[in-house]
Every structure is written in structure tokens, then in C-alpha cells.
Image: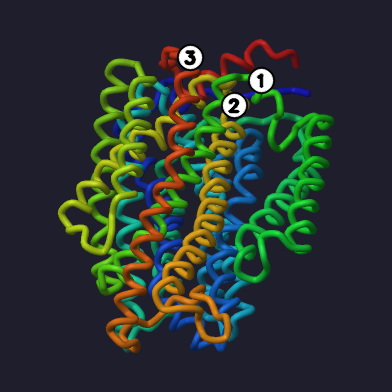
Amino acid sequence: MTVTADPPVDGVKPSRAQVVQALSGLMMGMFVAILASTVVANALPRIVADLGGSQSSYTWVVTTELLAMTATVPLWGKLSDLYNKKLLIQLSLGMFVAGSLVAGFSGDIGTLIASRVVQGIGAGGLTALAQVVMAAMVSPRELGRYMGIFGAVFAVGTVAGPLIGGLMVDTSWLGWRWCFFLGVPFAVLAILLLQRTLNIPTVRREGAKVDYLGAFLIMLGVSTLLVWTTLAGHQFDWLSGWTFFLVGGGVVVLALAVWVESRVAEPIVPLSIFRNRTISLTTIVSFLVGIAMFGGTVFLSQYFQLSLGKSPTVAGLMGLPMIFGLLVSSTLSGQIISRTGKWKSHLIIGGVFMIAGFALLATIDRGTSIVVLSGYMIVLGIGVGMLMQNLVLVAQNDVAAQDLGAATSVLSFFRSLGGSIGVSVLGAVLANRVTGEITSHLGPLPGGSSTSAVPDLSTLPEPIATVIRDAYAVATSEIFLYCLPFAVLAVALIFFLRQIPLKTQTGAERLAEETAGTPS
């Protein structure tokens, strides 16, 4: 097999101005991906009602995009190691545009769900490729300087999405369809910006083939497990025949995928990268952080609305302190790491802040003041900001350049997988705890019903509404308590990472060196 790589443009490393120009298209694409996941949050009740969907349809409109995104991240990452990264990221944006247009024009719930799959595949490409492209252009030592931009995009997309979705639904001359149309011009603009500004070497491996069988098995196995975590506790019991079938089937398919991956020349996930202690540890830590962070914080909005009685718009704004903490810590930590080249202490300090944030949030109740709650959220945001992007930086620094895409996508994949599992499992725990709290005060619910459906407190007598508010407060605080062990384990594993100096070469330069000695 012949391996060749084009030299960097003009034979020199991209200047900071060139990097920032290229970043404009990348960040626009990332904003679109985040917006797609958050903009429908407040619009879903109206969407499902207008299209005649059921409560099950409500769940699948959200879940299908997450499934498609999570399951396809490894494939996009591997493709970036074999083919033109610029073309791939433009292709993922194109798929997002197609999915968004179909979603906006959907006439029935089935079409909408199918379009969300296409959107999710495109978002998976953006999630995997943005950081791979950054690593190709910027050395690990310099990468920290740009982490604040990633944090800012994440913050704006996360906060703006639900607010924009609610505004679209409440504006008579717009409507919910614009929740999907809104991202289209941003995605098209990103494609045009990338065409003009992104110039990175193209890797060509003659005779290289994508392991499509391995990719299919990985996606099938992961999707099966994600479907189980999504439906278990709602559609069927955790201990049931469906659990045995889905978990057993998912594990068997993934075992077969590992067998296939160990025998092909170009595996989707090269198993050899897990011989690297840094990759193995950062992968596990990313998974644990995903469980704790997404599994805990996703229920805060519900706590704001049901326990504190805030409107959806105000609930969205109340998430700002955590986003502020994340943005500031991500930016400052990246700047300091770029200046000193030392990263391990930042991961440890970030982990300690994350533990402290969860411990503090585990004390909240319905009487917790907004000021105190905001302080707790800032602490958690600081911890998450110092951990998330820096884990990717550490992994990219200690992997061969030809496996940069695979290693980066593996971390993103396991973080998303952890988040999906965390949300599903902790969501079931929260629902059961809420039911227990309500029945302990009001007695068994009529007909043995549960509180899995979110109640409309405005329609209930005040004494009953008060009990439900207290129940959600108690259950939410306990969710953060359950997140603590995952955060503690993540910090413990960080201590075993070796402090490896950050490289001063870009991914493209490292790849050129690695391939220079490869025999033709």
C-alpha cells in the first residue's frame, strides 16, 4: 500500500489569521449541530400535536437524532484518516441541510423522524471532524488558545436553541417549521466559508478500503444498546424479556464487531490505539464525564420549571451561570496550557471542581435561592470546562497522526454514549423517585398510574401541586448525588495519565514525517 501526503499549503504552517479564518466555517458548522439538538426542546409539544404523533413519537423525534449522531461518529472519524477532511465536513453539512429541509416540510410524524436520522448523521460528522481538522491545522501546544472559541459556540448554541425554538412556536407568522429551516442558511454559509478558508493536506492511501462491515456492526450494536437505555423504564421494565433481547443482542453484535475489526487492514476503530495508556484512560474518563455531566445537568431545566415554577424561557436563561463557568474556565485553561505546556494539573483541578459542583447541587431543594443555585452551577461549569476539551487535547497529543481522526472520534463517541446512558438511566431513577415521593404523601396514584408524564401543575389544586414540586426537587438533588461516584472515579483515573509534553507540530506536519519513511 502506498501512502502519500501533500505538503502544507505554501510549505509553511498556517498563520494565526489563516487558522481563525478557517475556524469561522468550522464554528459555524458546530453551531448548526448544537442548535439542531437544542432548538426543538420547547417546540416539541406543538410539533408532535400538529403532526398527530403520540407520546412515543415525542421520544423518538429526540432520540433518533442522538442515536444517528452517536453511532456514526466512529465512521466519520475513520473516514477523516483516509480521505479529504474538507470534503467530508462539507458533506456532513450537506446532509444536515437535506435533513433540515425534509424536517421543515414534514407532513407526518414518520417523515419527521426519518429526517432527524439524516440530521443526526450530519451532526455526527460535524462532531467528529471539527476537532480532527483543528488538530491537523494547529499543534497541541497551540490548540489551547482556540478552545475558548469552542466553548463560546457550545454556550451560545446550548442557551440560544431552546429560546429560539420557543420564539418560533409563539410567533404566528413563523411557526415550528422554522426551527428546522433556521439552521439551513448557517450550514450553507459554513460550506462556503470552508471552501474559501480551509486548506489542509489531503492524505491518500492507495488501496485503502473502508471497513463497511465493521462500521455497520458498530452502529447496529451501539444503536441497539441506546434503544434499550432509551425505552427501558418507560416502554418496558429494566428487568424484562426486552432487556435481555436488546442488551444480549447488542453485546453479541459488538463482540462480532471487535472480531471483525481485529482482522481487517483498515478498521473503523483501530484496536491498537487502546494499547496506548493515554487513549485508554482518556476514553474511560470521557465516558464517565459523559454519564455524570449529561446525566445530571439535563434535568436542571425540569427542576427550574416544575420545582421553582419558572417559565420555559426563564428556565433556559437560568442555565447561563453554568455556561458562563464553562466558557471562562475553558478559555483561561487553554491559554495557560498553551503558555506552559502543562496540562495534567488542569484536568485534576477540573475534576475536583466537577465533584464539588455535583456535591453542592445534591443539597438543593425547592427553597434554594437563585443566587446560591447559580453559584453551584458556576462551580460545575468550571469543572466541565477544564475537562471536556482538554481530554481531547491530551489524546490527540499522544497518538500517531494517521490515527488522529479515529482517536478523536472514539473520545467523542464514548462521551456521547455515556451521556445517552446517563440520561436514560438517571431519568428512570428520577421518575421512580418522584413517584415514591408523591405516593408517600398522597397515597397510591389512581389506577396504579405513574408520574412518567410531566404534570401540568397549573391544572392541579395547590396542595397537590406543592407535593409534586417538592418531589421533583428531592429527586433532582438525589440525581446529582448519584453522579458523584462517576466524577470521583474519573478524577482517580486522571492521576494515572502521564504528563507528556505537548507537541509543537501540527497533525499535518506529523503525518508528513510519519509517512516520509513509509516504503512505496
**Label 2: few (<14), some or many (≥20) within 10 Å?**
some
Contact flag, marks 2 and 3 (Cβ < 8 Å): no
Q: Nearer the viewer, residue 384 or 183?
A: 384
Position of 136 compared to 74: left or right?
left
Amino acid carrying label 3: it is: Arg
The answer to whether residue 436 is above or below residue 321 is: below
Give the SS element for disc 3.
Answer: loop
Residue 69: image quadrant is bottom right
Question: Is residue 433 something one can see in this rendering?
Answer: yes
Q: Which residue is mark 2?
A: 280
Q: Which residue is mark 1?
A: 275
- Whichever of labels 2 and 1 marks the residue nearer the N terminus, that label is 1
**Label 3: few (<14), some or many (≥20) within 10 Å?**
few
- Whichever of labels 2 and 3 marks the residue nearer the N terminus, that label is 2
Q: How is the image coloured?
A: rainbow
Q: Nearer the viewer, residue 487 or 195?
A: 487
- Image quarter in which the N terminus is found: top right
